[in-house]
Amino acid sequence: MAAVFSILQHSTCPENTSFHFLSIHLEPEIISLINSTFPYLSYKIYHFHPNRVRGKISKSIRQALDQPLNYARVYLSDILPKDVHRVIYLDSDIIVVDDIAKLWGVDLGHKVLAAPEYCHANFTNYFTDTFWSDVNLAKTFEGRRPCYFNTGVMVMDLDEWRKGGYTQKVEEWMLIQKHTRIYQLGSLPPVLLVFAGNIKAVDHRWNQHGLGGDNFEGKCRRLHPGPISLLHWSGKGKPWLRLDARKPCTIDYLWAPYDLYRSSRVALEE
């Protein structure tokens, strides 16, 4: 709800924005809440059945990363109607503070995905020694300059995704992971294995990620230097939980104005 609110508030033409929500549980209360909060919102809700990935998920370093919904982004080309040709995938722990149309307008060229790249990050850390010591597996990135990118913010050409059969390619790596542990994280590494070094890079301002801290303790983090268009609380610490616990990080106060649940609770408490 906070993400939607922030997108609408900063959009020059909010009436041109359509939302596609992915949900495990299609509860009537959720639909009622959306309709009452955003009565003119253009949206659809799609059911993502956990059985679609239940047998394909391998245990990662944090239980939250193993939830089936984390893998739904891989199946967008199947879930969304064929007349949806391009989409911006966004995690729910984000706030947009710029016009989302600017990100939508990125020229993908012949690439399937666009996202901020982080080539200074140690890419080898995203895979195990087992992966890098296997000659055949290590050849995966030959001919590419692989860089880390965060899959919580992606512009996706669904037509090209469908043509290339990329869902199946990601699933193939998930199957290998089931038999040979080649990475520690959840849904991110198999996407990196398919796309790293072959995406359209966009400005870092569109994913100020890691604001939730690390994957184990969720310690407070500061903003990275430079302009910001999107704030992303990836990591263990979520702003709504820290605000509710009255133990917020300084960065969480940027989330608070968009948290419609919290603003109503605070009003009631006061």
Image: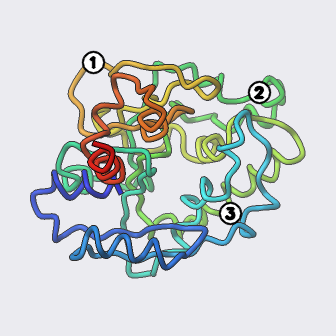
Q: Amino acid at mark 3?
A: Gln
Which mark, by number, is residue 46? none
Write the residue at 46% across / 19% down. Answer: 120
The label nearer to you, 2 versus 3, is 2
Q: Pointer 3: what residue?
A: 168
Q: Which quarter of the rendering shows the C terminus?
A: top left
Q: CA distance from mark 1 to mark 3?
A: 38 Å
Which quadrant holds residue 130? top right
Q: Mark 1 packing: few (<14 Cα in 10 Å), some, or many (20+)?
A: few
Q: Pointer 2: what residue?
A: 128
The answer to whether marks 1 and 3 mark residues whose Cβ atoms lie closer than 8 Å is no
Write the residue at 16% across / 71% down. Answer: 15
Q: CA distance from mark 2 to mark 3?
A: 22 Å
The label nearer to you, 2 versus 1, is 1
Q: Pointer 1: what residue?
A: 225
Q: Is residue 182 above or below residue 187?
A: above
Colouring convention used in this rendered image of the protein? rainbow
The answer to whether marks 2 and 3 mark residues whose Cβ atoms lie closer than 8 Å is no
Q: Which quarter of the rendering shows the N terminus?
A: bottom left
